[in-house]
Image: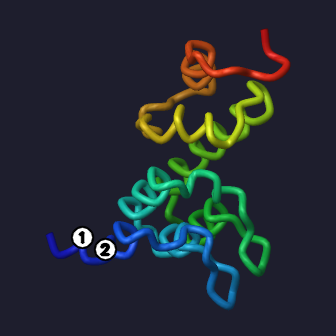
Amino acid sequence: MGSMKCYTPLQRSASLVQTDTDGLTPLHWAALRGNEEACHLLLKSGGLLMLDRPDGSGSSPRNLAWQKRHYLLYLVLWKAQTALWLARGVFGISGDELKTLLLDRDLSAIRHPDDLEESFSSCSCSRSGVA
């Protein structure tokens, strides 16, 4: 229960896009510290769209996890990043549709990009340029 104290600001609508003087967002900090639980919470709270945002030195949260040798967290962020790229590029899904599709999914269950394709092809959202 004590670990929930760190999530109180999120429950009070803290900004997921706010950065510190080094350009680090909350997702960057969670990745840097190797806090997988915080990363999952941030991703489900809207941080998914912050995955490719670089910090002041040009590093994404995924890059920071790798640099600090948080390899399992790196894989979780890589899966989320892959889902984001596929949704935007291949399926033409907008940010709002993406939140609806992915925020309720367990990204740790994704083992292969085909898993994402099956999820997106079965959705009822509109896709620009996709039949």
Q: Nearer the viewer, residue 78 or 92?
A: 92
Q: Position of residue 11 (x, y in %)?
A: 34, 67
Q: Nearer the viewer, residue 4 or 66?
A: 4
- Disc 2 is placed on an element classified as helix
Vertical order, 126 against 43 (above or below): above
**Residue receiving disc 2:** 8
- Left or right side of 52 for 109: left
Vertical order, 102 against 31 (above or below): above
Of the residues shown, which amino acid type is indicated by label 2? Thr
Residue at image x 38%, y 75%?
A: 9
- Left or right side of 131 for 31: left
Q: Position of residue 110 (x, y in %)?
A: 49, 31
Residue at image x 42%, y 32%?
A: 109
Quarter of the figure with residue 87: top right
Residue at image x 57%, y 27%?
A: 112
Quadrant into which the N terminus falls:
bottom left
Q: Which mark is residue 77?
A: none
Proximity of marks 2 and 1: CB atoms separated by less than 8 Å: yes
Q: Residues within 10 Å of mark 2 (few under 14, many from 20)?
A: few
Q: Position of residue 42 (x, y in %)?
A: 46, 60
- Left or right side of 39 for 129: right
Quarter of the figure with residue 19: bottom right
**Residue receiving disc 1:** 4
Of the residues shown, which amino acid type is indicated by label 1? Met
Q: In this view, which residue lies farthest toward the left?
A: 1
